Image (tube, rainbow, N blue to C red):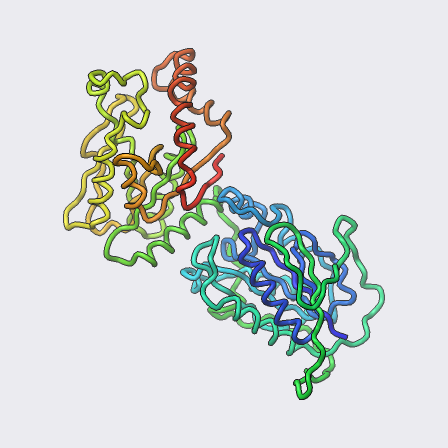
Amino acid sequence: MARALVVYESMWGNTELLARAVADGIAQVMPVDLTDVAAASLDLDDVTLVVVGGPTHGHSMSSPDSRRGMRCLGALHGSICTGLREWLGELPEEDGRWLATFDTRVSRNRRLPGSAAGSAAREGRRHHFHAAARPRSFYLVHADGPLLTSEVDRAREWGRMVAASVPAPRQAKAGRHLSRASRPPASVAQDAAGPDISLGGPVLVQHRVPEPVEDEPVPPETTQPEPLAPAPATAEHAQPEPPPAPAGYDPTLELLVERVRALQAHVGTGRPVLVGVAGEPGAGKSTLTASLVAALQEGGTTAVLVPMDGFHLANVALAALGRADRKGALDTFDGAGYAALLTRLRSAGPDTVWAPTYDRSLEESVANAIAVPPGTEVVVTEGNYLLVDEGPWSAVRWVLDEAWAVEVDPDRRTERLVARHILFGKPPETAAAWVATVDEPNAAFVRATFGRADLVIRGT
């Protein structure tokens, strides 16, 4: 009797939801096992149909680098070391099994060439699998989800159609057994209703095929065809393999760019998208946001970086207020002025808006230093206190279309801060004392606001 195996790779849980739906559809036709790729066996001796699904990263299947980038963005599921690329690459050559592939992609990028499903299908052809169906994509709002409406239903119906198209197997040939000792056995029996398993961690589920219903169509038996030649490329499937990623390729940055572009599609063209990046002192906010703006500009988007630090109170004002010895604390900034600037930028008036910046060599703000021309598509802002929910600062979060937070290893962050203070003129002992008595209390205050962020990025 024909039996199917569904193998999925999922870091945010979206592809797992689709894989479960695909397995439900297949179960209407034949028994099916469902497993995370990290737990999948290479022994396929009793499997007729293999279905694999995973996310599209960089126009292809994911890699350890791209999965590491997802983990930095907060993905909690899946394995960094083992994905579909690695599992398919280790399979033995086949001569009688069927393969179907699917992937998840950001809806905005649906017309871009290349996909994980197309790459997986090409890998299957190299292993002499027969194509059971054309590669299929399912779509997300953002890289981390959610799925578009009705995608789960589409996946369930696609699984049923794929299974119905597969002919009954001939008797298996001997001598094609290859197991991986480090992976668990290939099935864990469950009852027909399926198990109640939460997302996360390798899972392996066996669905039972329901009892046949009278007059239910049965797929006709046919002889096994020769392996299919590569399908012609179309906008929907089987695109040419993309070129290798260039030196310095940053999968985390690519995902953030995708997220901003999805926000642009949602907001429309009437005003700029405003994205804020919060974080503790020394977390790398300036480096991340400068890279993000540069990547957006390289892609043809007009983007400007407007830092919160331009709203430091002047040193003479801090001295008059008695706050010079804790410069950088919340009450040493003009929070109301910062919120008013962001509100003005969001309103998209006909004139250029001039924003201040902060000159570390002077340790002073510089007025009217950053031009934001009319028609700017994206404004990125960064600073410690974007997520604070008190006083004038509470307005900042609601002006932003999205707010992200960056967190890094505390030891690495304090090392950066001490080095920065030394670079701008403080003696080493003074720099270390300033970090301990001023920067660290500010960092603890900022860290407590991360619950208001749409996304927490684990930096390096």
**Could you tell me which residue is drawn at 39 percent across and 17 percent down?**
434
Q: Is residue 368 left or right of residue 401?
A: left
x and y, in percent, of residue 219 in the image: 68, 82
Give the image location of residue 225, x and y in percent.
Answer: 70, 78
Comparing 387 with 407, the one in front is: 387
Q: Residue furthest left?
A: 351
> How many circles with numbers are drawn on the protein?
0
State the residue lying farthest toward the right.
174
Q: Give the residue displayed 42% in from the left and 11% down from the top.
A: 429
Q: Residue 395 is drawn in which quadrant? A: top left
420 up-or-down from 196: above or below: above
Residue 121 picture location, percent across and down = 60, 65
Up-down relation of residue 226 to residue 88 (above or below): below
Horizontally, is 149 left or right of 164 in the view? left
> Residue 296: x and y, percent?
35, 48
Compare residues 367 and 325 and report the one nearer the observer: 325
Residue ID at (39%, 40%): 291
Q: Quadrant of residue 192?
A: bottom right
Nearest the viewer among 304 and 444 is 444
Q: Residue furthest bottom?
A: 215
Q: From this viewpoint, is residue 128 visible?
A: no
Side (left or right) of 414 relative to 52 = left
Q: Is residue 280 above or below residue 140?
A: above
Q: Is residue 432 above or below residue 64?
A: above
Q: Is residue 166 visible?
A: yes
Q: Quadrant of the N terminus?
A: bottom right
